[in-house]
Image (cartoon, rainbow, N blue to C red):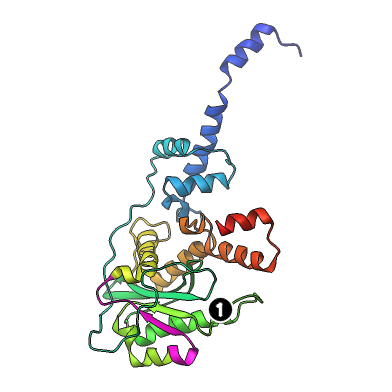
Amino acid sequence: MKVSARTYRSWKADEPAPRVVTDALILNKLYDLHKPDQKTLKLKPEVLYGRRKMRIWLQRNGFPEISKHTVDRLMRVAGMKGLVRGRRTTTTIRSKDKIRAKDLLNRNFSTDAPNKVWVTDFTYVPIRGGFAYVSFVIDLFSRRILSWASSTSHDTAFVEEALQLALWQRRNERHPQVRPVLGTVHHSDAGSEYTSQRYTQTLAMEGLVPSIGTIGDAYDNAAAETVMGLFKNEAVAKESPFRAGPLRAESDVVELVVDWVHWYNNERLHSTLGYRAPVEFEELYYDEISGSLPDEAARKLAA
């Protein structure tokens, strides 16, 4: 079929500009994040991202050349602001009269390999008739949550359960290059749960080296405090994409923690890790030390 020159010019004039087409595709991607899952009715966790992480996420999902200005503009169009973090409430009861281990970190929250330093803390979630408490053990190298435990009381047995699960996790991993858990520094705040005789003995029997921050100073355990804050703001908050409804019982909290920890470890982009997920960051480390990582990727990891 032949098309006249006038008709062709008219069609070209009506054709949308490339930027308009790209904007529409990106907006569709952003709007899709707000569509509830058909089974769980939950939103996608990436709705929590601000401009920086959203840009990285879009670059990895079909728009490698997208600029920060485009992300800013289209997030405003889509009505997205990202997560605004709230303040964390202190839950631990400090023990002032016991001899405690020294603070071996001195607010140096960086290390060069897995299993050199673990940090731990717990927080609370309001439920019907009281609270559910959730304890996390985190590897400082990758910020990976190694384990967690929940309870309706915050005693030594509760935090010890999380510790034992972390030990099991690391001892059953298949990386031949993994550093032995023996000698790992275990850093916590000065809460009575962590300074108790029972917990101190458990650390000694497992070959962990205790490190405890000063009393009443959250900055001494800032790495763990950060994870507690993320959990409260990303998972527990009323508008969280991980919540299916009211948190009435501990079982509701457990379901929420399972989903959030999986996303946090395997998909969430962490700025401190070069916008990688913790599991991905560890895998890159093991690939690098085994010599299987390409030179360019190794340089990026080192940076």
Q: Does the rendering let one see residue 35?
A: no
Q: Residue at x 29, y 89 (%)?
A: 99
Quarter the N terminus occupies:
top right
Q: Which residue is drawn at 45% across and 36% down?
A: 69
Q: Is residue 209 magenta?
A: yes
Type of residue at label 1? Arg
> With respect to residue 13, does 46 lie above or below?
below
Q: Callout 1 environment at 10 Å: few (<14), some (14 to 19), or many (20+)?
A: some
Residue at which label 1 appears: 170
Q: Position of 117 compared to 151: left or right?
A: right
Q: Nearer the viewer, residue 75 or 178?
A: 178
Q: Quadrant of residue 102?
A: bottom left
**At which x and y percent is residue 61?**
58, 46
Q: Position of 24 compared to 178: left or right?
A: left
**At which x and y percent is residue 47?**
44, 50
Q: Is residue 19 magenta?
A: no
Q: Nearer the viewer, residue 94 or 28?
A: 94
> With respect to residue 63, does 171 lie above or below?
below
Q: In which quarter of the image is residue 189?
A: bottom left
Q: Does the rendering let one see residue 156?
A: yes
Q: Position of 211 compared to 191: left or right?
A: right
Which stretch appears magenta?
A: 203-217
Q: Quick one: which residue is furthest to the right in this view?
A: 1
The residue tagged with tag 1: helix, strand or loop?
helix
Q: Which of 1 and 6 is in front in this view?
A: 6
